[in-house]
């Protein structure tokens, strides 16, 4: 029977699910899969995106680990596609490749002053608090008043991480440098801004409700934002999720908080709706000093129009949480506008035409764009895998599909790759670091240290 040698690039949920689904699928050929991952640890944004105080979601890792632990997928960690291994290499040694490289960068927000000192992308901050090895170890948490732009779950994650007291994060897996950074933060007010109204947010109810349960943090919402138009009332009446979100916000309107007398917490988390960011103002040293925003109002169809009314909030730092954006890969088509690999149901297309690129597939966030939950990457992978199976006639014809060729190639290039056994070693090490403090794990952050532990060097 023919054996499909398949390379998957990216060991996030999308790549791991694709491997699992293909191995379990009904097919008329054998399968041998190699998973390439630029980081020394697998699981992508589940390890380096999902917030540390969301252990239930981090628990998805258990399911992904079960797939890897079965032992029928080889992992080559600390191997970057485009640098350590190229498309030409893959064509020599595999019949096809699936790119599952996700998204790690922030989408842009084009307003004056957004590049000022004190203005950050949410993705970079997330990478810092989740202990990503490729970002600086320290984070400038010097602001008392912070703005967060965006009305999705990432905006909630970073607002919560900014407002939450560091000691309340201690039971989680946060690295020591993150605890110390957050502990020293002088923050008192976090202001979250959304262009649209409470009935149009992209938050999910569970994540929103969690804000109201933070220790020593008051939720502040503003009555003027709840003058609902017909489209909002319709959304609240007919969409269960919007109804729950409205109920949560309405409860906060009646709670004691800073804007209705009462509210004794040392920190406040303000939600501003109908607020479109216009400009980040700076002081004489070029540091962020205020956010100018324009009030919007509903256009009657679920959208907004600007009102011309400008307002200003003094802040010392600002985070844009307006979406993630994929990165291009060497010799692989890329859609610059949407930050994805152009594709039809996971079959990669040329960037300048709808012509298929044989043997090349995509799945997960790099296929669909950076929206949706971990579970969505599973249905995504099913679609992509179905095409791989059906496309047998157009797979590549590799000159050397032997399994031995890849370790030999990486060794020849001096790549210090890590494997499944190495991941187990690092995993155990992180758990043992947490044990004396009664924590599930403490992450190892520096890449060199991760690699040395994995390789038992
Ligand atoms: C801040 C944040 C919080 C989130 N919280 C939740 C949540 O609570 N619940 C939920 O369900 N979903 C959550 N998500 C969404 C979830 O993380 C994504 O749906 C999912 O991770 C996308 O999977 P993926 O495999 O496509 O991409 P990723 O998880 O990004 O995995 C891609 C992998 O590819 C690797 N890679 C990239 N380039 C290369 C290269 N050149 N060579 C080799 N490897 C490469 C990366 O290192 C990474 O490991 C969150 C996302 C973010 C950003």
Image (cartoon, grey):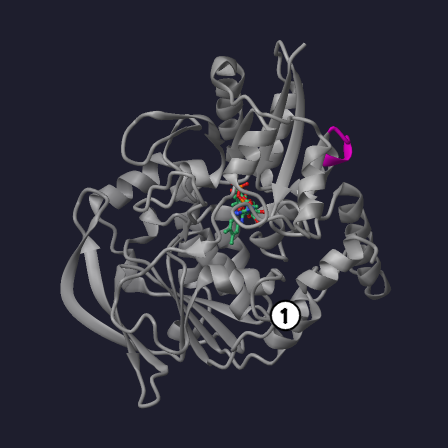
Whether residue 275 sits left or right of residue 369 in the image: it is left
Locate residue 351, reporting x and y percent: 32, 36
Locate residue 349, reporting x and y percent: 36, 30
Q: Residue at x 51, y 27 (%)?
A: 379
Locate residue 35, reporting x and y percent: 64, 37
Q: Residue at x 71, y 40 (%)?
A: 408
Whether residue 326 sits left or right of residue 160 in the image: it is left
From the viewer's side, name the closer residue of 166 and 430.
430
Instruction: Check the image and name the residue furthest to the bottom.
Output: 284
Instruction: Check the image and name the residue furthest to the left.
Output: 308
Q: Which residues are magenta?
A: 67-72
Q: Is residue 9 visible?
A: yes
Q: Residue at x 42, y 74 (%)?
A: 146
Q: Is residue 314 magenta?
A: no
Crowd band around label 1 with a 10 angstrom C-alpha radius: few (<14), some (14–19), many (20+): some
What residue does disc 1 label? 178
């Amino acid at each position: 029977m023919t054996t499909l040698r398949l390379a998957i690039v990216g060991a996030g949920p999308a790549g791991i699910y694709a491997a699992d689904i293909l191995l379990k699928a009904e097919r008329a050929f054998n399968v041998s899969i190699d998973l390439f991952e630029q980081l020394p640890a697998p699981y992508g944004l589940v390890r380096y995106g999902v917030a540390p105080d969301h252990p239930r979601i981090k628990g998805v890792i258990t399911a992904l680990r079960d797939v890897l632990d079965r032992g029928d997928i080889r992992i080559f960690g600390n191997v970057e596609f485009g640098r350590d291994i190229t498309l030409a290499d893959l064509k020599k040694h595999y019949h096809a490749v699936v790119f599952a490289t996700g998204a790690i960068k922030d989408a842009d927000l084009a307003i004056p002053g957004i590049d000022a000192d004190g203005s950050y992308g949410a993705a970079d901050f997330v990478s810092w608090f989740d202990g990503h090895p490729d970002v600086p170890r320290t984070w400038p948490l010097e602001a008392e008043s912070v703005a967060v732009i965006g009305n999705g779950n990432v905006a909630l994650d970073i607002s919560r991480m900014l407002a939450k007291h560091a000691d309340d994060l201690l039971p989680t897996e946060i690295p020591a440098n993150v605890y110390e950074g957050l502990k020293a933060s002088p923050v008192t007010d976090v202001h979250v801004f959304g262009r649209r109204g409470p009935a149009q947010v992209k938050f999910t109810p569970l994540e929103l409700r969690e804000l109201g349960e933070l220790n020593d943090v008051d939720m502040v919402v503003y009555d003027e934002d709840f003058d609902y138009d017909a489209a909002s009332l319709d959304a609240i009446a007919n969409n269960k999720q919007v109804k729950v979100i409205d109920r949560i916000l309405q409860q906060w309107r009646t709670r004691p908080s800073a804007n209705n007398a009462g509210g004794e917490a040392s920190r406040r988390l303000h939600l501003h709706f109908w607020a479109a960011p216009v400009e980040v103002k700076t002081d004489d040293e070029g540091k962020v000093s205020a956010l100018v925003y324009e009030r919007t109002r509903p256009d009657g169809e679920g959208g907004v129009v600007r009102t011309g009314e400008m307002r200003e909030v003094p802040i010392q730092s600002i985070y844009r949480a307006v979406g993630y954006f994929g990165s291009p890969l060497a010799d692989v088509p890329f859609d610059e506008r949407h930050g994805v690999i152009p594709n039809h149901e996971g079959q990669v297309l040329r960037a300048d035409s709808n012509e298929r690129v044989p043997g090349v597939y995509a799945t997960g966030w790099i296929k669909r764009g950076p929206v949706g939950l971990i579970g969505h990457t599973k249905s995504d992978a099913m679609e992509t895998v179905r095409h791989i199976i059906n496309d047998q006639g157009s797979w590549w014809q590799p000159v050397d599909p032997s399994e031995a060729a890849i370790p030999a190639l990486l060794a020849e290039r001096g790549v210090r790759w890590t494997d499944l056994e190495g991941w187990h070693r690092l995993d155990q090490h992180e758990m043992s670091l947490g044990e004396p403090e009664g924590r599930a794990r403490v992450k190892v952050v520096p890449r060199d240290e991760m690699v040395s532990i994995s390789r038992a060097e």
